[in-house]
Image: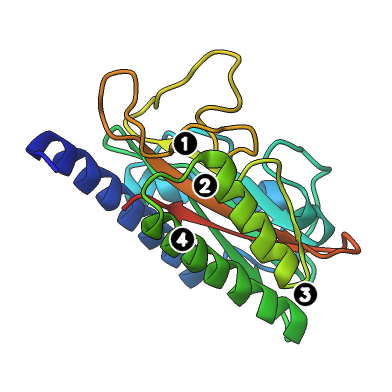
Amino acid sequence: MDQIEQRRADSLRAAQAKAAALFAEIEQRGLIRPGATESQVSKEIFRLSRDDFDAGRHWHKRVIRTGPNTVHPYQIDPEDRTIAPDDIVYLDLGPVFEEWEADFGRTYVLGDDSRKQVLSRLVEALFREGKAYFNDHPDITGAELYAKVTAMAEREGWDFGNGHAGHIVGEFPHEKIIGDKISLYIHPENHQPLRAPDQFGRQRHWILEIHLVDKDKQYGAFFEELLTI
C-alpha cells in the first residue's frame, strides 16, 4: 500500500474509532432508555456528536429503531416509537470526522430477554465471519458477498433484513453514481470485484452491514463497520 492509500486507510480507521467512542458515550449517558422516543434519542445523539465530538455533520440520516421498527432497513421511515423496558434497539449513524465518513451500527437489548441477547451477539459474530470470508477471497464480488451473508443468516434461522449488505465509504462526500444503487453496494446484482479501484484509481473502502430479522417479523438486530480495514 502506497503512502497516499495508507493515509486514506488511517483516516477511515481514525473516523471509525471516534464513532466507537461516540457510541460508548451514548451508552455511558444512558440515552437509550425506556420512555424516550426514537426521535428524541436522535436529537440527543446529534447534540452529543456536535458538542463533544466535533461531528455536526452526519452523511446519512440518523437511524434509531426500537422494537418492531428494528425489522425495517435504513430506507424505510417507520412511525416514531417510544422505547419500552424490554425492547431491542439498534443505532445506525454516519458522523463525519474531519472530512472522513464513519458508518457504525450496533444493537442494544433492554431487559433480560435471552433470545434478543443471543441475537445481539449473533449479528456481530456474523459480521466477523463475513469479514473473514472477504479477506480470504481476494476477487470476491458484491453479489458473492451478499450471497454469503444471506446464507449465514438463513443457516442461523433468521432472515436477512435488507436488499444489500453494505456500500462504499470514504472522504466526504464519497463516490456516487447518479441513479446507480448497485455497483457501489454489496448487492445481489453487483458482479464487480469489491477490490476493483474507483474511477480515480484509488482503493475503494467498504462497509459491511448485517441485519437479521425474526422470521415472524417481530424484531431484528443490526451491526456494521468497516469491511476493508
Q: Nearer the viewer, mark 1 or mark 3?
A: 1
**Residue 21, quarter of the rendered image:** bottom left
Whole-angstrom CA distance, mark 4 to mark 3, is 37 Å
Q: Amino acid at mark 2?
A: Leu
Which residue appears at 26% of the width and 36% of the height?
Answer: 98
- Residue 58 numbered mark, or none: 1
Q: Amino acid at mark 3?
A: Pro
Label 3: which secondary element:
loop
Whole-angstrom CA distance, mark 1 to mark 2, is 7 Å
Q: Amino acid at mark 1?
A: His
Q: Amino acid at mark 4?
A: Tyr
Q: Is residue 113 visible?
A: no
Q: Nearer the viewer, mark 4 or mark 1?
A: 4
Mark 2 and mark 3 residues within 8 Å of each other at the beta carbon: no
Which residue appears at 59% of the width and 28% of the height?
Answer: 182
Q: Name the N-terminal-most of marks 4 and 1.
A: 1
Q: Name the N-terminal-most of marks 4 and 3.
A: 3
Q: Name the N-terminal-most of marks 1 and 3.
A: 1
Vertical placement of 96 versus 16: above or below? above
Mark 1 and mark 2 residues within 8 Å of each other at the beta carbon: yes
Q: Where is mark 3, residue-wise?
A: 85
Vertical placement of 192 versus 66: above or below? above
Q: Where is mark 4, residue-wise?
A: 133
Q: Where is mark 2, residue-wise?
A: 93
